[in-house]
Image (spheres, rainbow, N blue to C red):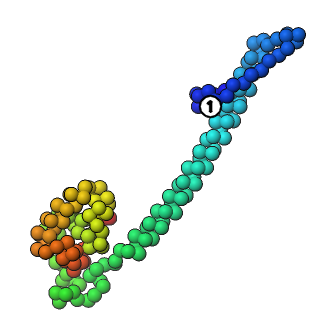
Amino acid sequence: MYVWDEPFALLHADFAERCGGVDSTDRDRLGFLAEGIGAIFERNLTLERLRIMRALIDEHTREIALLAETFDSHIPGDFAATAEFGDDGRGVDERRQYRDSDLHAKLTQRERQVLGLLTVGKTNAQIASRLFISPNTVKSHIRDIMRKLQATNRTDAALKGRRVALPPSP
């Protein structure tokens, strides 16, 4: 007997000589029986695999939902909306204008993504994993961000990113 073109069992049948022995009709019937048993076995294996896959999908779905909840609970809202005025005394609208004109003009799109993740406290490794780049590339982007924003360290760059209400990138 075969399952998915692989042998898995041997069906042995015998018929007494005094009754005429085994002929081609008997062999055909045994062949049909073996094929039927193989088909039933394939079906049961397929159903079991589908049950396992369904359980894994359900488990992954629950884990993704938990991750999404955790992620949502750790992302601050609009940084500019948290206070009417920032440290520099400018109002929310003024800071948004600064963000749109100054910061966005200074930084590349990738640097804005890195800065957005930096502002929510992600490590270089986490940023690299999230953006599908190497940690060394993240370091290079952070150096460029610090230079462009005239930040003395990564914390200063993150604070400047928060001050101008730069949202975290996806």
In depth, the one of 94 and 10 nearer the eye is 10
Residue at 78% from the left image edge and 12% from the top image edge: 23
Please say whether residue 37 is visible from this viewpoint.
yes
Query: Which quadrant of the figure contains the C terminus?
Result: bottom left
Query: Which quadrant of the figure contains the N terminus?
Result: top right
Vertical position of residue 167 compared to residue 38: above or below: below
Residue at 28% from the left image edge and 67% from the top image edge: 123
Q: Is residue 131 left or right of residue 21?
A: left
Which of the 4 quarters of the picture holds residue 32? top right
Residue at 17% from the left image edge and 61% from the top image edge: 140
Q: Considering the numbered disc 1 on the image, is that residue within a helix, a strand or a loop? A: strand
In depth, the one of 34 and 94 nearer the eye is 34
User: Crowding near pointer 1: few (<14 within 10 Å), some, many (20+)?
Assistant: some
Amino acid at dot 1: Val
Which of the 4 quarters of the picture holds residue 109? bottom left
In depth, the one of 64 and 125 nearer the eye is 125
- Total marks in image: 1
Which of the 4 quarters of the picture holds residue 97? bottom left
The residue beneath circle 1 is: 3
